[in-house]
Amino acid sequence: MPNHHLDAEQFKPNVRLLTVGAALAGVGAFLSFTGAALVATALATAGRRIVTAWETHPVEMASRTARQAMSASSAARDAWRFNAS
């Protein structure tokens, strides 16, 4: 009958290998975070550059679109009421 009991003395990982692995994982995480921050900065800068090149401000475009939607809704409601009579 095999003995599957594990003693603490039998489990001895290579501490140097664990330390190097943890250090490399930390460096990799730092590089990943730095890379993601650089990508986000580049995309935000490009987006900001595009928005500033527009002739009309985004708020003005949104309000114009909202007015058009309300006008279309009102016209559709009036047409439905006119045809329902």
Image: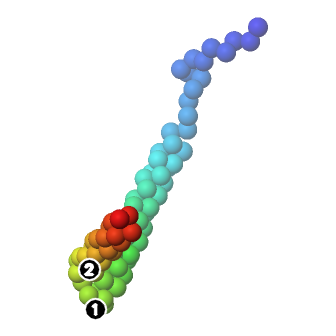
**Residue 52 picture location, percent across and down:** 27, 87
> Is residue 34 rendered to the left or right of residue 74?
right
- The spot of residue 58 in percent (x, y) is 27, 79
- For label 2, the crowd category at 10 Å Cα-Cα, with few meaning under 14, some 14 to 19 and many 20 or more, is few
* Image quadrant where one finds the N terminus: top right
SS class, disc 2: helix
Location of residue 48 by image quarter: bottom left
Q: Residue 64's mark? A: 2
Residue 57: percent from the left, percent from the top?
A: 24, 83
Q: CA distance from mark 2 to mark 1?
A: 14 Å
- Label 1 Cα crowd, 10 Å radius (few <14 / some 14-19 / many 20+): few
- Say whether residue 15 is left or right of residue 84: right
Instruction: Give the residue at mark 1.
Output: 55
Q: Is residue 22 above or below residue 49?
A: above
- Dot 1 falls on a residue whose secondary structure is loop
| Residue type, mark 1 in image | Glu
**Closer to the camera in the image, 79 or 41:** 79
Image side of residue 6 versus residue 47, left or right = right
- Would residue 76 be visible to someone looking at this image? no
Please tell me which residue lies in front, 62 or 2: 62
Q: Residue at x 60, y 18 (%)?
A: 6
- Locate residue 38, reporting x and y percent: 38, 71
